[in-house]
Image: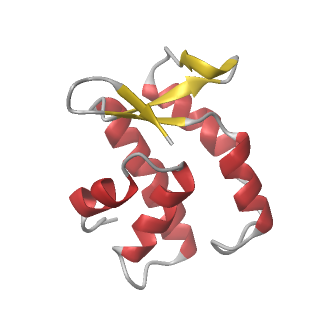
Amino acid sequence: MAIRNLDKIYSEAYGLWISSLFSAIEGNNEGMSFDDQREAFFAILALWLNQRKIRFCSPSDPLGGVWEVPGAHIIDYLKARWPRHATDAHDPDLNLYFYDIPALLWVGADGRLHGS
């Protein structure tokens, strides 16, 4: 799957909550289906974790501990909690998902972490 406008998605979502990233994918890839948006979401998270552009708070320390595990483990964790019955971006369970998963941390140009 081709994801267009990765740099624009990054700049639009930087420093914001993870739901903003999900919305920026759709906003910059007009006509993308919800299923493709979900797959793009996980692909972008995996890419940016590997590039060290983002990190996540640890599920065991959601108020500050950085999750020190391989990116693939984080993606598996996030995928396992995705609400399988969600069919669109406005599903209330999807909104709960974004609040229930560990917080996204953005890595600034200076290497400092920034949360939303």
Residue at (34% x, 60% y) in the render? 12
Residue 27's spot in the image, x, y percent? Answer: 40, 75
Q: Quadrant of residue 57?
A: top right
Q: Is residue 30 above or below residue 54?
A: below
Q: Is residue 61 above or below residue 97?
A: above
Left or right of residue 34, residue 94 in this image:
right
Residue 79's spot in the image, x, y percent? Answer: 62, 44
Left or right of residue 37, residue 94 in this image:
right
Indicate the quadrant containing the N terminus: top left, top right, bottom left or bottom right: bottom left
Asked which colour scheme the image uses, the reply is secondary structure
Q: Quadrant of residue 51?
A: top left
Q: Nearer the viewer, residue 35 or 13?
A: 13
Q: Is residue 68 above or below residue 25?
A: above
Q: Nearer the viewer, residue 102 or 35?
A: 102
Residue at (24% x, 66% y) in the render? 5
Residue at (31% x, 35% y) in the render? 53
Left or right of residue 18, residue 77 in this image:
right
Give the total of numbered labels.
Answer: 0
Residue at (44% x, 73% y) in the render? 26
Residue 21's spot in the image, x, y percent? Answer: 46, 57
